[in-house]
Image (tube, helix red, strand yellow):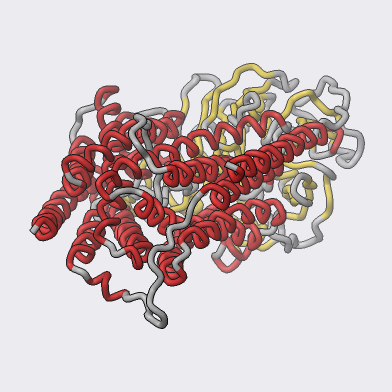
């Protein structure tokens, strides 16, 4: 019933250690943009169902377009950004497309194809901008502080995601339930995000390539990169998706359906609080360890979901671990990958790793749905736990070996 | 520094534009309200509906059976979707300004007797013929946390006993004669036979089924494929529904009638795509809303036997319920 989002927010609090101005600027852009995009996400169902009177199935069709649009564009965006050595330009293009898409939603009226096009454009913009933005963060930060830098960025990003729905509700209340006002405000906020990017974020273009020399994608076959890609994709196979985790919690705890949205809020809170500490920890003790630790937390989540331990303590523990899983993996993976990738192909490399994880996750969430149908919920979660043990073991072998190689 | 200043100035300008738009939109929607009057929604020769006319937008209203396009009696009650039978009504309406919704139980004069908070966006509403059991469908979605994928939930409330069915997804499903379980079950569009039996739409694995349900036994079983938003005729023999053209909802819906004895389908004379749960005007006629622009709609009627022509029954209206008994 719930499809995957390919990206997630992250977060935590800045303790005042030195974070590059460029990272803070990028964090500000992400915060503002997430306010804008989450405003729309929050009211889009209302708009389609109450505003336009669409029935369930049409809404599903429009909504399903969300997922496919990002993966390919992410790779293309990454490659082009490296090719022209303009990460800021490509990221800006992505933010810009999403801003224009808000106007498209308004202009589409009741036309389903036009609405779909606007939604796809919004998502495409998101796919395009992610890898260049993460590459800029790595290029703006000393390699040893990357974990914390990503933690701060993801914290700001997720603060925006929190504020978005609240702003949307405020706009609806102030305008007498006018959906067009939400889209206009969202478009204005998205434009502010683009402006902040253009005016305050600095591009890192790096050394110009020798005339006529093309970027060498074969560098992506470097052992460290390849291992990380395989390990990340392998671990991606053990994620079943938020929808399924919350559904299991809801059914097991017999929660009234009203609690459902709060499960996501709980996870995000844990994520927000833990992102910076875990990022900083990754810088100190090693990113591989924290990254693997995050997936170990996910494994514990599956194991807990497979037991009969119930009640509020179980619920809080599961959500804390699940938020911790995100905090220990999302930004940390980028911090891990950045230094392994030569600057001239870094955006492509990051895009490749993100896409690899996203595709693996798509496969595993579909398989989990099938397993649920076949074996019932408890059988499926046990299967997921077994898969998590296997992939975690395999990745640990791969990643810890890489670390020795790098050290040597 | 100059760049920071520039960013600040531009941002302020954009924020000013946004705020201005919100204020203007707020005033634009404050249309002069029609005077509210006492509305009789007890059984009798009238149709209850939701008005989309500018002066009474969103209000529950009635018209006389004899003159459905004539003078309407408008209540003070705002509903997104409503229905009434045997003097008991259901109204799904906004709950405060926070884009949340509630279910209001109405009496025969549209006075609110009780309310329940709802999770999700209201879509369909029905009352059993006796007025004892209410059913509703909501969309549950959709921020980025759960991936934005939609699902629907159909629930029920027995007004007499206070018993609720939180979501039909918990019912035991029999598909094509065999027990069936899946995580992607969605239910919508309940229509009642009596206080214990109903029909509804169930979707799973990309298909949409007509199901027959038993509330006491907590079971549903599939009867036919490609039947959405069923509506049982007053004599209980036929179901009006929307049939996805070519089995694909992307191609729109054809309003149709299914004979429950023979399982024969008849396409009705309405050829526009109808995305509504139809209601029966009498045993020979169905009525349904057709959208006009982003805010308005009209209630049309068409013969249930496939003949005749669709005609506007109530202009500027939707969510109709005939209050007489057939």
Residue drawn at (48%, 53%), measured in percent from left and top? Answer: A202
- As drawn, A80 above or below A259: below
Figure quadrant of residue B274: bottom right
How many marks do you count on the picture?
A: 0
Residue drawn at (23%, 50%), measured in percent from left and top? Answer: A375
Q: Position of B99 compared to A338: left or right? A: right
Q: Position of A307 compared to B303: left or right? A: left
Regarding residue B272, the answer to whether it shows in the image is yes
User: Looking at the image, which residue sits at the far bottom?
Assistant: A212
User: Looking at the image, which residue sits at the far top?
Assistant: B113
Regarding residue A50, the answer to whether it shows in the image is no
Of residues A195 and B199, the one nearer the viewer is: A195
Q: Position of residue B58 (x, y in %)?
A: 75, 34
Q: Position of residue A112 (x, y in %)?
A: 64, 59
Figure quadrant of residue A407: bottom left
Residue drawn at (64%, 55%), measured in percent from left and top? Answer: A100
Q: Position of residue B294 (x, y in %)?
A: 74, 48
Figure quadrant of residue B118: top right
Quadrant of image for the C terminus of chain A: bottom left
- As drawn, A357 above or below A249: below
Q: Position of residue B201 (x, y in %)?
A: 52, 49
Q: Position of B93 compared to A344: left or right? A: right
Of residues B39 and A317, the one nearer the viewer is: A317
Residue drawn at (58%, 58%), measured in percent from left and top? Answer: A97
């Amino acid at each position: 019933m719930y499809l995957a989002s390919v990206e997630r927010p992250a977060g935590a609090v800045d303790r005042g250690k030195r974070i590059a101005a460029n990272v803070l600027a990028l964090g500000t852009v992400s915060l503002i943009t997430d306010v804008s995009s989450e405003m729309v996400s929050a009211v889009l169902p209302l708009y389609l169902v109450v505003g336009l009177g669409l029935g369930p199935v049409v809404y599903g069709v429009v909504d399903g377009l969300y997922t496919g649009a990002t993966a390919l564009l992410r790779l293309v965006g990454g490659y082009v950004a490296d090719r022209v050595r303009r990460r800021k330009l490509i990221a800006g293009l992505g933010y810009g497309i999403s801003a224009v898409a808000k106007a498209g939603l308004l202009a589409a009226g009741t036309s389903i194809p036009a609405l779909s096009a606007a939604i796809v454009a919004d998502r495409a913009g998101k796919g395009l901008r992610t890898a260049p933005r993460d590459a800029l963060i790595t290029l703006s930060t000393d390699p040893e502080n990357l974990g914390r830098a990503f933690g701060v960025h993801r914290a700001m990003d997720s603060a925006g995601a929190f504020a978005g729905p609240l702003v949307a509700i405020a706009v609806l209340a102030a305008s007498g339930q006018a959906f067009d006002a939400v889209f206009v405000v969202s478009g204005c906020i998205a434009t502010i995000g683009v402006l902040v990017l253009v005016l305050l974020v600095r591009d890192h273009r790096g050394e110009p390539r020798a005339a006529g020399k093309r970027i060498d994608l074969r560098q992506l076959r470097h052992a460290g990169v390849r291992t990380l890609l395989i390990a990340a994709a392998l671990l991606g196979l053990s994620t079943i998706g938020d929808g399924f985790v919350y559904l299991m919690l809801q059914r097991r705890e017999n929660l009234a359906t009203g609690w459902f949205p709060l499960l996501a809020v709980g996870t995000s809170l844990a994520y927000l609080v833990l992102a910076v500490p875990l990022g900083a920890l990754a810088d100190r003790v090693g990113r591989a360890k924290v990254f693997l630790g995050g997936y170990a937390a996910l494994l514990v989540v599956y194991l807990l979901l497979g037991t009969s331990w119930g009640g509020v303590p179980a619920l809080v523990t599961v959500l804390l671990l699940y938020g911790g899983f995100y905090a220990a993996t999302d930004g940390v993976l980028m911090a891990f990958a950045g230094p392994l990738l030569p600057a001239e192909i870094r955006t492509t490399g990051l895009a490749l790793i993100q896409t690899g994880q996203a595709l693996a996750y798509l496969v595993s969430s579909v398989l989990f749905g099938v397993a649920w149908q076949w074996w019932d919920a408890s059988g499926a979660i046990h299967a997921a736990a077994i898969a998590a043990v296997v992939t975690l073991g395999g990745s640990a072998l791969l990643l810890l070996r890489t670390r020795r190689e790098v050290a040597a | 520094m100059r760049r920071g200043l520039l960013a600040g100035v531009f941002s302020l300008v954009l924020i000013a534009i946004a705020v201005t738009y919100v204020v203007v939109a707020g005033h634009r929607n404050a249309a002069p309200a029609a005077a509210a009057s006492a509305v009789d929604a007890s059984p009798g020769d009238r149709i209850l509906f939701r008005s989309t006319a500018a002066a009474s937008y969103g209000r529950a209203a009635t018209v006389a059976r004899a003159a459905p396009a004539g003078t309407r009696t408008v209540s003070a009650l705002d509903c997104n979707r409503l229905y009434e039978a045997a003097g008991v009504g259901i109204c799904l309406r906004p709950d405060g300004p926070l884009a949340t919704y509630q279910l209001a139980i109405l009496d025969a004069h549209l006075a609110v007797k009780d309310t329940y908070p709802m999770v999700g966006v209201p879509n369909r509403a029905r009352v059993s013929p006796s007025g004892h059991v209410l059913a509703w469908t909501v969309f549950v979605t959709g921020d980025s946390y759960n991936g934005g994928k939609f699902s629907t939930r159909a629930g029920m409330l027995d007004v007499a006993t206070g018993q609720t069915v939180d979501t039909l997804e918990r019912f035991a499903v029999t598909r094509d004669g065999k027990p069936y379980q899946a995580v992607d079950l969605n239910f919508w569009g309940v229509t009642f036979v009596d206080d214990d039996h109903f029909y509804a739409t169930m979707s799973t694995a990309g298909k949409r089924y007509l199901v027959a349900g038993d509330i006491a036994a907590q079971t549903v079983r599939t009867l036919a494929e490609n039947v959405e938003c069923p509506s049982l005729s007053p004599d209980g023999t036929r179901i009006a529904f929307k049939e996805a053209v070519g089995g694909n909802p992307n191609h729109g819906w054809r309003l149709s009638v299914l004979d429950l004895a023979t399982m024969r389908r008849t396409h009705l004379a309405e050829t526009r795509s109808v995305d509504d749960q139809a209601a029966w005007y009498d045993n020979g006629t169905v009525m349904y809303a057709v959208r006009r622009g982003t805010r308005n709609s009209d209630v049309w009627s068409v013969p249930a036997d496939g003949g005749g022509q669709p005609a506007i029954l109530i202009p500027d209206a939707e969510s109709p319920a005939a209050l007489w008994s057939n």
